[in-house]
Each structure stands twice: as C-alpha cells, then as structure tokens.
C-alpha cells in the first residue's frame, strides 16, 4: 500500500485502486479546524509551563512544512512581503495638508546613525516575513549598559523565529496576553533542555527594567487570547489537497498497468507448463507443482508489467507465439486496453486545482492580479494590476506596518524622547498609469 495525502493506493488481484480517506478522519495532526481550544491549558517544556501554539505546540513548523510543499504559497507570501516593503524603511513625520493625512519623509542623521549601528533593514525584512506567515513578530530588545543606572537605551533589536518562541503561562492563570510575564526561547523540535532560555516580557513604559527582554507584537485573532494565527489558516484543507495532486498524478503515471490493460493468457499454455514440470520433477507433490506454477505466473506478469507500464516505455510492444491445442482450437495471447477516461480525470483534477489555487490566493490576502497567477495562459491586464495595487496600498498595508515596525518605533521614542513625532515607516512609490505619465518618463523609455 502507498499513501499520498488522503489517498491510499492498494494493489489487489484485480488491479490497483485509489481509496480516498475522509478528511475528518485523517486531518493533519498539526491542524484542527474544528475549533478546539488548543491554548486552553499549559504544557510543560524544560520545566516551564508554556502556552501551546497549535494542537501539538508546533504550529509554526507545521505551517513551514505545509508551505514548502506548495507551489503557490511561498511565491504569494514573498510577493506580499515585497509589496509591503516597497522601497524600504525611511523616517517620517505625520502632517495634515488640505485636510489630508500625509507622511513627510525626513532625514535625521542622529536617528539614522543609531539605525545603521545594527542591521535595521534586515530586521524589517525578517519582521515582515514573520508577520505575513503568522500575523505576529517576536522581538528581542537589547538594552545598553545605562539600564543599570536607570537610563534606558535600546542598543538594537533582533527578530526571533516564531518556531523558537513560546509564551510562558501567566502566573495568575488568566489566559490573557497582557498577563504573560515571560517568553521561553529554544529549539522546540529537539526539546533539549540546554537550548532553552527564559526572557522577561519587554515593558515599553519601563524599558530600563531588564538588560534583555522580548516583546510579542501581533494582530489579534478573533477568539484567541494569546497567539495570533495565520490569515490563511482556514485555507489549510485546500493547501493540503493542492499539495497532494502532483504526487497522485505522478504515481498514476508510473503505475498505469494497474488500470490500463487486461491480459488474457491461453489456458493451454499453462496446461503445457504444468505437464512439463511434472515430467521434469516426478518426485514433486501437487503442492510443489502449484507453488512453482504460481512463481512462473508472477514472473511473467512482472515481465508484462515492466514492458507495458509507465510513461518511459514509448513504442512498447509485446511478442508471443500463437498455437493450436489438441482439439484444433487456436490459442493466443491478448492484451486489451481498458477505457480509463484519462482526459476526464485530468480535466477534473485541473478544475480542482483551479479552485484550490483561488481559495489559496484568497486566504493569503492578496489579489490574484498581484499574485502573478496565470490560468490557461492568461494573466491580468496592467489596469487590473494597477487598481489592485492601489487598493492593497490603501487598505492592507498600514496594520502590517504598525505591527512589524512597532518595536523600532518604541525604541526611537525611548532613545530620542526629544524627537517626538518621528517614526520609521515603509516608503512605497505611487505607481501611475502610463497614460498619466509624460512620454519621456514612461517605463518603456527608462530601460
């Protein structure tokens, strides 16, 4: 038996059959879309009670494994991250002009020097990757020596992998994020106790409290008090099915003999084989004769299968010798093809794949016009992409920017309290239609 996703392929005497297992009975152990409250009770890790993240406390790695086998997810999320990043981080002030809220981009050498003293661009990219995948970011705040005398100064920030971070269960047993006081950091795959370290939660209103602390910045998920979950969590069944389709089709291509042909062998052929065995081995019992006959049939069947099965056997043929039995009746081998309706099967799988692609794209929160998805050789027009981009910039960027850059902007406020109103944002160049751009400035004349 071979198992691919929810399909089990079984070899029987009549051929190979694909059995589809019910989704509710074979759902991945990492995902439970039935609404189970997996963060309702703590689990023990390295002697600490932590808030489980997912049914098996391994949701980030489960998301990783799911996406690595998907042909659409990583590309869509990379595109979404790139659209959010735009032309990169820059400092700005907020102003009101003509009753409109606008960002005035500025150059502040002092703040810029601090930003460049650590890899702030790498931090921003990593934070956006974490946010687009899990709607949250774990940030380690590294404080300077001045914290020992009560003078707060953030030396730098580290964006930690979500897979290595878990919230420690609140001491008051209230399942509320604001009651979490510590974060456990370590390798939750190996569970080696020496790899775990406990850090206090960062308090931005009392930053000099600890030399190193961790903050969890996230988009609150409805009905979840602790961790945020991915925006595409509800699309997991479609992702699972989409991941299985290529493997199923490949398996069928490599095992076509199971459903493609019926082989007819003449009875007189095997009667003659049995007579020859009895003459060559008169001492054999009937059981030994039958065992040898079964072996010969298996060997011949395997030979036919090797010749006829699989896409690599182009120009396949099978040779045999026709003969006449003792009663004068002609005996011959016959191989008859079975009508398998492969075209209908592939068409059905294609339709399922399209639905899965559409559901997957919707779950990732990015318009198909911006996701670079080509269906039937057709892509969206430039106007469709332009309007989709404007809607994305107008509605889907500010929350992500606020959460991903919250740690940096808190650090700017702590380090430079006299520069109130200065923030780090993501600069995105406004793209106009070619019709609205002068001929000399159009893209075709800039290459």
Image: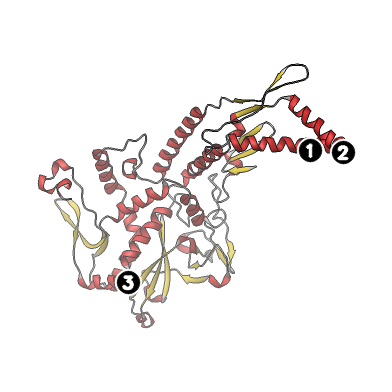
Q: Cβ–Cβ below 8 Å for labels 1 and 3?
A: no
Q: Relative to the observer, which residue lies in front, 256 or 249?
A: 256
Is residue 317 in sight in this rendering? yes
351 left or right of 152 in image: right
**Is label 1 or label 3 in front?**
1
Task: Name the residue located 57 percent from the left edge and 55 percent from the top edge.
Answer: 56
Residue 185 x, y percent position in the rendering: 49, 67
Q: Residue at x 62, y 30 (%)?
A: 319
Question: Disc 1, disc 2: CB below 8 Å?
Answer: yes
Q: Which mark is residue 118?
A: 3
Q: Residue furthest bottom?
A: 149
- Locate the N terminus by quadrant: top right
Disc 1 from disc 3: Cα separation:
76 Å
Residue 272: x %, y % from top left = 78, 28
Q: Could you say which disc has been placed on residue 292 in the image?
A: 1
Whether residue 20 appears in this view of the structure is no
On residue 284, the disc is 2
- Element at label 1: helix
Indicate the quadrant where residue 273 lies.
top right
Q: Is 164 displayed left or right of 10 in the figure?
A: left
> What is the distance, in whole Å, between disc 1 and disc 2 at their CAs?
10 Å
Q: Going by the image, does 342 lie left or right of 420? A: right
> Does residue 337 sit above or below 176 in this rendering?
above
In front of the other: 299 or 221? 299
Q: Earlier in the sequence, mark 1 or mark 2?
A: 2
Q: Crowding at label 2, few (<14), some or many (≥20) Cα neighbours within 10 Å?
A: few
Q: Quadrant of residue 334?
A: top right
SS at mark 3 in the image = loop
Mark 2 vs mark 3: in front: 2
């Amino acid at each position: 038996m071979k198992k691919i996703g929810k399909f089990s392929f079984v070899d029987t005497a009549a051929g190979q059959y694909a059995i589809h297992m019910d989704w509710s009975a074979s759902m991945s152990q990492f995902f439970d879309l039935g609404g189970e409250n997996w963060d309702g009770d703590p689990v023990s890790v390295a002697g600490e009670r932590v808030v489980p993240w997912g049914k098996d406390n391994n949701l980030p790695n489960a998301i990783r494994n799911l996406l690595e086998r998907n042909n659409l997810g990583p590309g869509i999320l990379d595109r979404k991250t790139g659209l959010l990043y735009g032309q990169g981080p820059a400092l700005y002030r907020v102003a009101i002009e003509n009753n409109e809220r606008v960002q005035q981009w500025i150059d502040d050498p002092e703040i810029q020097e601090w930003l460049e003293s650590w890899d702030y661009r790498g931090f921003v990219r990593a934070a956006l990757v974490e946010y687009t995948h899990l709607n949250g970011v774990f940030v380690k705040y590294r404080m300077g020596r001045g914290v020992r005398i009560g003078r707060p100064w953030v030396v730098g920030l580290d964006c930690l992998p979500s897979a290595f971070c878990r919230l420690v269960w609140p001491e008051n047993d209230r399942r509320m994020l604001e009651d979490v006081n510590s974060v456990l950091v370590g390798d939750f795959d190996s569970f080696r106790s020496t790899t775990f370290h406990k850090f206090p939660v960062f308090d931005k209103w009392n930053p000099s409290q600890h030399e190193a602390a961790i903050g969890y910045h996230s988009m609150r998920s409805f009905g979840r008090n602790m961790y945020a979950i991915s925006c595409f969590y509800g699309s997991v069944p479609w992702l699972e099915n989409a991941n299985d389709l290529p493997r199923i089709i490949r398996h069928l291509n490599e095992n076509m003999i199971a459903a493609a042909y019926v082989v007819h062998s003449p009875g007189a052929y095997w009667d003659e084989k049995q007579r020859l065995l009895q003459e060559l081995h008169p001492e054999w019992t009937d059981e030994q004769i039958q065992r040898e006959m079964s072996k010969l049939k298996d060997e011949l069947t395997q030979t036919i299968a090797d010749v006829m099965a699989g896409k690599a056997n182009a120009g396949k043929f099978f040779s045999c010798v026709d003969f006449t039995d003792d009663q004068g009746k002609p005996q011959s081998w016959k191989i008859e093809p079975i009508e398998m309706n492969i075209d209908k099967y592939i068409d059905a799988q294609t339709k399922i794949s399209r639905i899965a692609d559409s559901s997957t794209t919707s779950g990732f929160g990015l318009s198909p016009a911006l996701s670079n998805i080509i269906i039937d050789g057709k892509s969206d027009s430039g106007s469709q992409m332009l309007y989709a981009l404007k809607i994305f910039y107008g509605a889907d960027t500010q929350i992500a920017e606020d959460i991903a850059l919250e740690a940096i902007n808190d650090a700017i406020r702590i380090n430079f309290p006299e520069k109130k109103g200065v923030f780090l944002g993501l600069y995105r160049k406004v793209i106009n239609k070619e019709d609205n751009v002068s001929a000399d400035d159009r893209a075709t004349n800039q290459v």
